[in-house]
Amino acid sequence: MAQGHSVRVASGAGLRAAVTDAAYQAAGAQIVSQAEALATELVLKVRRPSAEELAQMKPGAVLVGMLDPFDRAGLDALAAAQLTSFALEAAPRTTRAQSMDVLSSQANIAGYKAVIMAADRYQKFFPMLMTAAGTVKAARVVILGVGVAGLQAIATAKRLGAVIEASDVRPSVKEQVESLGAKFIDVPYETAEEKAAAEGVGGYARPMPQSWLDRQKIEVAKRVAQADVVISTALIPGRAAPVLITEDMVKAMKPGAVIIDIAAGKGAHGTDGNCPLTEAGKTVVKHNVILVGETNLPALVAADASALYARNVLDFLKLVLAKDGSFSVPMDDDIVAACLMTQGGEVKRK
Ligand code: NAD
């Protein structure tokens, strides 16, 4: 608005994040129908438009959102609709891109909410308590995958008083885990191949050699068998989430233990996650263990998820909208180039 654009908001768009139409109007936006909102020159969305929504968008329009850069069929549909589209998940993990990093802003929320959900489902306390009626032991929490979500899960579980151990393939994580007061599950690299894979690319994990995964499994299995809560967040961009908690490991867990599988829906079979017993979108009890397969944890903290996402989108827009309101695609900007998915009827994803 401050840049002189007129802004249309689909009626009810913010309701589930506790933002009323009146609040948007007070900020100067025009409340319109969903179809009218989709028919603008620049459309800002959370998710990729459905086929029905695409049909309502103007050819040549610009779309910004979380558009699933690895879903080729989805990108083909955006290209066929003649949209210039930007997927914010594809932004590089650099300092300059931090304020528009949707993966980070949302994973941070997922890590927090995973712990809160675990505390809710778990039938015991998180903190150690000494009461007149006896002493309560602190919960043992194991975090698998220590990216943005895992780090926030450690910090949140720590605040609740749990004893935490964490595992990741990337050695650089050890220091971060320890600085948050948790213990790193060390699995030393024994070959040059293992070491090279562990370094990853652009800060992201790469699939690890089987030799290392086998040793990691043994170490993780010991911790998981003792755990009250396991939170798994391990992802490898563009690939199925690795299996870190096998059925045998679940069988060895304590009755009443809780697994929150943040990778739910991203496993090799589509409905599983880091655990093959996870059922995406459901909470199930298997071998007396509670498995939570919530696929959209940020949506359960909708107001903050929305506010942080809005800041990400706004900062990205500053790269493609000039002060005079004109739109351009500066391909010499590494963030813009990385996020550009489709233009002129073609898929441009790098
Ligand atoms: P992610 O969601 O892609 O993956 C979650 C974690 O799972 C990662 O830490 C990954 O190493 C781990 N993992 C993968 N396979 C595993 C296995 N077999 N066992 C255990 N763990 C496994 O990660 P993310 O949160 O998106 O973060 C990815 C990287 O980007 C991190 O290095 C993070 O620090 C970095 N990052 C940088 C910036 C920035 O500089 N602007 C911003 C955000 C994140």
Image: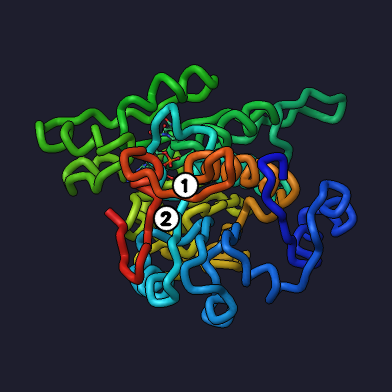
> Could you tell me how far apart the alpha carbons at marks 2 and 1 are, in whole angstroms?
7 Å
Considering only order in the chain, which callout, 1 or 2, is on the residue closer to the N terminus?
1
Mark number for residue 249?
Answer: none
Residue visible at 38% across and 30% down in the picture:
185
Q: Badge 1: few (under 14), some or many (20 or more) residues near its Cα, within 10 Å?
A: many
Residue visible at 16% across and 44% down in the picture:
211
Residue position marked by numbered label 1 in the rendering: 233
The quarter of the rendering in which ligand 1 is drawn is: top left
Residue position marked by numbered label 2 in the rendering: 274
**To which quarter of the image does residue 153 belong?**
top right
Q: Answer above or below: position of 247 versus 92.
A: below
State how the image is colored. Answer: rainbow
**Residue 110 versus residue 55: which sits nearer the camera?**
55
Q: Are marks 2 and 1 in contact (CB under 8 Å)?
A: yes
x%, y% of residue 80? 39, 77
Q: Report if the beta carbon of the residue with label 1 is closer than 8 angstroms to ligand 1.
A: yes
